[in-house]
Image (cartoon, coloured by chain):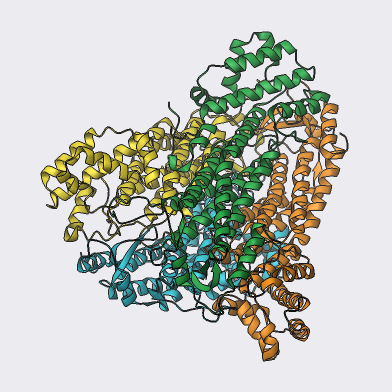
Chain colours: A cyan, B yellow, C green, D orange
Amino acid sequence: MTLPTFDPGFTTARMTDVFSAPRRIATMLGVERALAAAQAAAGLVPEEAAAAIARACESFGDDAEALLVAGWEAGTAVVPLLDGLRAVLGPEDSRWLHFGATTQDIVDTALVLQARDGLDAIAPDLERAASRCWTLATFHRATAAQGRTFLQSALPTTFGHRVAGWWVAVDRAAKRLAAVRATLPLQLGGPVGHLAAIGAAAVPVRAEMARLLGLTAPAVAWHTDRQPVRDVVSALAEAASAAAKIALDVALLAQPEIAEVKVRGGGSSSMPHKANPVDAMRALAAAEACGGVAGIVTRGAPQALERGLGAWHAEAFAVPLVFQTAAAAAEAIERCLEGLEPDPARMAAHVRGTPPADLEAIALEVDRVLGTRR
Amino acid sequence: MTLPTFDPGFTTARMTDVFSAPRRIATMLGVERALAAAQAAAGLVPEEAAAAIARACESFGDDAEALLVAGWEAGTAVVPLLDGLRAVLGPEDSRWLHFGATTQDIVDTALVLQARDGLDAIAPDLERAASRCWTLATFHRATAAQGRTFLQSALPTTFGHRVAGWWVAVDRAAKRLAAVRATLPLQLGGPVGHLAAIGAAAVPVRAEMARLLGLTAPAVAWHTDRQPVRDVVSALAEAASAAAKIALDVALLAQPEIAEVKVRGGGSSSMPHKANPVDAMRALAAAEACGGVAGIVTRGAPQALERGLGAWHAEAFAVPLVFQTAAAAAEAIERCLEGLEPDPARMAAHVRGTPPADLEAIALEVDRVLGTRR
Amino acid sequence: MTLPTFDPGFTTARMTDVFSAPRRIATMLGVERALAAAQAAAGLVPEEAAAAIARACESFGDDAEALLVAGWEAGTAVVPLLDGLRAVLGPEDSRWLHFGATTQDIVDTALVLQARDGLDAIAPDLERAASRCWTLATFHRATAAQGRTFLQSALPTTFGHRVAGWWVAVDRAAKRLAAVRATLPLQLGGPVGHLAAIGAAAVPVRAEMARLLGLTAPAVAWHTDRQPVRDVVSALAEAASAAAKIALDVALLAQPEIAEVKVRGGGSSSMPHKANPVDAMRALAAAEACGGVAGIVTRGAPQALERGLGAWHAEAFAVPLVFQTAAAAAEAIERCLEGLEPDPARMAAHVRGTPPADLEAIALEVDRVLGTRR
Amino acid sequence: MTLPTFDPGFTTARMTDVFSAPRRIATMLGVERALAAAQAAAGLVPEEAAAAIARACESFGDDAEALLVAGWEAGTAVVPLLDGLRAVLGPEDSRWLHFGATTQDIVDTALVLQARDGLDAIAPDLERAASRCWTLATFHRATAAQGRTFLQSALPTTFGHRVAGWWVAVDRAAKRLAAVRATLPLQLGGPVGHLAAIGAAAVPVRAEMARLLGLTAPAVAWHTDRQPVRDVVSALAEAASAAAKIALDVALLAQPEIAEVKVRGGGSSSMPHKANPVDAMRALAAAEACGGVAGIVTRGAPQALERGLGAWHAEAFAVPLVFQTAAAAAEAIERCLEGLEPDPARMAAHVRGTPPADLEAIALEVDRVLGTRR
């Protein structure tokens, strides 16, 4: 059995890598290793056992895809993963593997670590998009353009003011993702969340494991309280929305009767004269997809008692897809902006409305929005 | 034409009042008045005109329901509202009414003010629910109970640890709503968002208007950038989710074969012996409804250029419903918790699993979660 | 406590009436009455008791709003409704009231009956909209217009061909709603669905009750199998989607730089020169709202064992809102089409693309689509 | 760049194959070939050209994954696909390749053909599940069990009656999918939908192409009228819902304090004594995922004028995922039912309620539901 695939238009190469099967298994191994190391530091686990576990994790050679397939038979890939590690470790060291932990601790912490890598993978595109908006807005701060409300001509504005609005949303989305990244929590609660098997050492173990993995140590296990996951997903959906807004505006402005911007055009199989706004199209499609899969998480059913049945597992489907579709939207809008050619003469020709706009007053507002003037 | 109604089970009396037609119109009048006052303070509008506008707003007697009906004919209730005010003001003062503003400035700022009142209306129920969870968790910190994962017996826990998890989610939701409340922004951008008609006075006018209304002054108009609305809605959805989680757990624990808690029972039309968990049911139903209407906002289509067509207007439907369903969920869970009677003997009878739990270690974790111990 | 209200732009006057509190209670009374009559016809209930029940239902004078409020206390409005009826009936006749039935039988059958009235209330607007599309498509079957794909000029088409596509969707939606109307099932399963209390008479009682109410008799109770409800809701969402498609096309064609159609314009509070496409806007907003509330039903959580907890109750919120928002979309698009003025000269001016279109060939395709030619 | 993957728990091996990259490209080639053949039959295209096109399609050797990646650069995989074919065909035959068609004709028809294969891939699991329900319901038609409403004991029922309800939903879902399969339409409208380039031959070409591909010939192109896609998706979501309902009931009945059924248990990494209901869990997770991706299609934005921007493309993401998640839900529930062991003694022990149930009357109702008695 091979893993199922989906259309590359809804991800990026970097994000495909982050959520690949090998990365997922490798990340889980890293969590088991950090757990043992943190417990060794707290004196719960012999140093030698932790070292043996680290070596076993490092040299683990089982096929990642096969593990994922076997995992669904067993209900979780952690079971065959532990079987594989125990086959290498002796029975004594095996006792200390996964000590006090539960499957969900490993799965959730690995997901959070992949989320961190995913946030790193999407950040550059968002930053480039924000930077491009900033440059465009600055350059066109006083470029007269027709303001349009309800798709009707309203009063004049400047193209820079419109683009400054794009910048605000992309910049805020990038900052929000960075803020989410800074507070990603590990998961460590043991079978029913109270970590009592570890006893008083729970606090230092969580702290040390968080230090090793570069995560925060939560006050309590969040096995059935999925707010950290919803926070990541909502922030990604915001980023996709910011891209979709730009894409919609660009597509509207690129209509031939308006033609206030030119875009990199995609080919048509039947109409060689056409230049389809393919980057805007991709951004809109990816954002639409992102909103749908994000809803699986944000509208997730409440999760019963100490571990949810189904709704938790649905995250294993939805979260990687949210990352990939958001990344696709960000990359597409970055390319769209890179290839965007505004046409000030066309913009000027469309300006109408009373009273005539005071372009410099608008430009000063643009400066304030961009933070270059108070 | 009377206004359409919906089932009272999906709101609370306080929230019905916040989103009533009279409150909506009164809030819009307050925005027009604050706008004039802020502009008078900035020297843009004569003091006498601002005073006349304030008086007209205060004595405005048009029928709120009729205005809303007329509003949909005109595309917005602001048009008939202004007509009504101008009929009272002379032509000179009328010039200064709604000066430099656009319909969306009034509608959005009024929505934000109603949102603030709505946040105040839901807060007490959430606080009472959090407080009840805290008390229950403290009291039952060491009360042995069976931990259940995937609806199967797992390892022992304490009832207090389970309830501490409820508290975490409700308390966090309440704090998040308070944080959202503290940063609610006004809307003031004028017809296409740049407020150039007001010129250099835009900054002080926004600041003064924000002061008068108790809102924050945003750096830029958010006519088509709906993040403030999504933030409110997402925070309310989190509160409803927290209620739904408790409701689900309670309903599961109240199953007669488990019977670890008793709940206030609702009647059955056909089975007098039954005690339906009506408060849990109401909380679940309201949370489900909340998630659905919240999705209208959070998955909202991108809004075109300087004003969205349709997606913006859909908020007028969705946002009040999000508040009301979230409030219903909060009130229901508060009542559910108030009437909840845990049965420690039943809980003890169901405890199984190896190794036996160290109840005091769990209780110490509960203390840490509740913040009474580090 | 008054019932909560919502904005009249998201319903129609007729649909407000269908889902009003008095209609809801009156419909429930009609179900109880039909149940008794059907049981009397089957010899299960004395004729006199059925007659007394009919009289009690007819003269029932309790306040509908108060009953709904009381209902949420009790978990269902049926409990206070039956209390009210029993207060009028003597103890002997009371025995035969609601005989063998459960609350959900009454609530679901009443919902289905209101759905039937709701389908009747939306049908005329859809039919008028379809008729207007048909007329427009016929008249403009050979009116040259620019075909636009991805918002770019593609090849020439005719305005009639575009409108014929609108007609197909509206006409199909209307027919689908009619098909759904023809198969609406009653609900009668008794407390746990098997209706065993009625015994062998279950089949004739269901048949007679269906006859009396003008519904179909299902083979089995659908207490937790909500397909009939999802069918109604999906069909309404299709109707709203058909309206939204027309609204989007109209708004795009009404852009001033394109201006191939003129629409009835809504006023602007700040820009007297503007003519906002308010009907298209309303249709889009209502369709967006409709999609959101429909999702509460179509994505409804699975409903446990013999009666769902929460997900069923959420329908009491969602279904009336789906009807009302769909009706609003239908009415808005009907008005939009009524006021639509195509401008063939503008259309001709925008035609470009190679090869030139064979207008008559397109017109023949229009004829085939409309069914006036094979 | 490799194609992105997702977790195998959300698909089946057969469905992975149906929506693999090679199948997608092969299906598109089949559509181009059928188009040429149908046009040759109508005398529009020389027989030799059609034959050359058929050979080129058959021997087409380009890498499917690379084509999909290239496709997103160009806006569609059809552009590089045609480039590849034209490199093999001479310039004369190339003229007749893709004659009169547009990209969307190929993409949509290929999607419909994959949908047909997908429907064939899911059908056996649904049929086996339905058959297993039928057998269980028949066998346990009079097996006393406690009816439970709102998770509370209500009145007695039989296990067979409960399972008969499962059967009704699965059987109906299977039949609905079969009905959808029987009416799947091809897409053939040419660049803007009217197919005028083919002229009067449009009708016979569509008919012959439909015959060759085993599809129906629609009266009109459905480029922006996505009802056929929504129909497939809604029917699959119904199947997933039917699976989720069974899964929820099974998980509730398998709770250890109830224990009325035993299930094949999945392992736990930390609690060897546990038997997690993994099949129910998988079914619930897959159904939840299915509902989310289905919403991308069913709540799809209206698609502008002659071709949608973004919302259409989002289907390329959503539709394959809807199929795969629905298939996963069906397979999981089939395995769940296969391993299900009811415990009549436990069921009997839990029966309570007044009046005592007439088991034979319930069994007769079961017979009627299953259609073995009228």
Number of numbered discs present? 0
Q: Where in the figure is residue A15, as x and y percent of width and height?
A: 54, 71
Q: Where in the figure is residue D134, as x and y percent of width and height?
A: 84, 43
Most foreground residue, C49 or D342 = C49
Is residue D134 shown left or right of residue A54?
right
Most foreground residue, A51 or C114 = C114
Residue B102 seen in render:
yes
State the residue at coordinates (49%, 52%).
Answer: C337
Residue C32 appears in which quarter of the rendering? top right
Q: Where in the figure is residue B24, as x and y percent of width and height?
A: 34, 39
Residue A306 to residue A143: above or below: above
Q: The C terminus of chain D appears in which quarter of the rendering? A: top right
Q: Residue furthest bottom?
A: D90
Residue D257 to residue A328: above or below: above
Most foreground residue, D168 or B239 = D168
Q: Where in the figure is residue C62, as x and y percent of width and height?
A: 52, 18
Residue C302 seen in render:
no
Q: The N terminus of chain D appears in which quarter of the rendering? A: bottom right
Most foreground residue, A58 or D202 = D202
Residue A177 appears in which quarter of the rendering? bottom left
Is residue A184 shown left or right of residue C30?
left
Residue A97 appears in which quarter of the rendering? bottom right
